[in-house]
Image (cartoon, grey):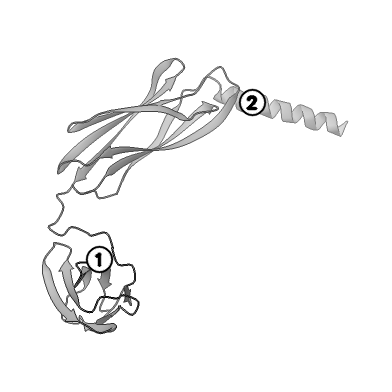
Amino acid sequence: MKTHQLTFVTLLLTFFLTGNIYGQSPQIDSLKIIPTNPTTNDTIKVVAYTTFFNSPCFLASSSFIIGTTINVYASHQNDSSMWPAFCNSIDTLTIGQLSAGTYVLHYHLADTVPPTTYDIDTIIFTVQQASGLQLIDNSEQEITVYPNPTTTEINVDFKTYTANRHDITFYSVLGQKVKTVKERKDITTIDISDLTDGIYFIVITSENNGRWTQKIIKNGT
């Protein structure tokens, strides 16, 4: 008897839950732009968190209309005739590089069966002009910089790197050159107590034109 009662309760609960979601339209839960504070050097992407009430709900296609107002059309394969079930989708779509300015992005959530727009959400973001400092992909991974964060000095370890001479240049986040050191030793300790607290970029150039970049944080506390 208990088994029959449990089965009845389970069926009743299932009917109640599916009845509540049946016929509901897909919705956009949230949007975000990555990186969070984009510059003109960044490849900008939009991430959409969406909920469907039928399964499956995979992204089938997307398209963009780009200006100061950006329209993103995301079409999902989702059939409302299927058995009701929650289906969450996280989709990352690449917008690309944009000029400096403020943009309004409208995200259109659509279904391909039939093609219908179910929900629209909007996000506003600003693209900053990149600073004069261009980050460099590290070409010499044998270099180690430590400690990081640091307080008054930084160690640069060249022990597994074959070049004989290195130019070590410190840049501020605005791209201003604030310190330059020329070294030949395997391990170099550089006094940076004269620099104000903040974020810096070390650019190391070897005699064979290899270039290596590392972000460091100086914190005097």
Secondary element type, mark 1: strand
The C terminus appears in which quarter of the rendering?
A: bottom left
- For the point 12% across and 72% down, which residue is it? 178
Q: In x, y percent, where is residue 116?
A: 40, 17
On screen, residue 87 versus residue 123, left or right, reads: right
143 and 37: which is toward the camera: 143
Label disc, if present, on residue 185 of the rendered structure = none
Secondary element type, mark 2: helix
Residue 73: in sight, yes or no? Answer: no
On screen, residue 95 versus residue 75, left or right, reads: left
Check disc 1 and give the amino acid type.
Thr
211 and 181: which is toward the camera: 211
- For the point 25% across and 66% down, which residue is it? 212
Mark 2, residues whose alpha carbon is within 10 Å: few (<14), some, or many (≥20)?
A: few
Which of discs 2 and 1 lies nearer the camera? The answer is 1
Q: In x, y percent, where is residue 14?
A: 67, 28
* Picture quadrant of residue 125: top left
On screen, residue 44 versus residue 58, left or right, reads: left
Outermost residue, top direction?
114
Mark 2 = which residue? 16
Q: CA distance from mark 2 to mark 1?
A: 59 Å
Q: In x, y percent, where is residue 145?
A: 31, 75
On screen, residue 52 versus residue 83, left or right, reads: left
87 and 56: which is toward the camera: 56
Mark 1, residues whose alpha carbon is within 10 Å: few (<14), some, or many (≥20)?
A: many
The N terminus appears in which quarter of the rendering?
A: top right
Mark 2 vs mark 1: which is more N-terminal?
A: 2
4 and 66: which is toward the camera: 66
Mark 1 = which residue? 213
Figure check: 87 above or below 167: above
Check disc 2 and give the amino acid type.
Phe
- For the point 47% across and 35% down, which residue is it? 89
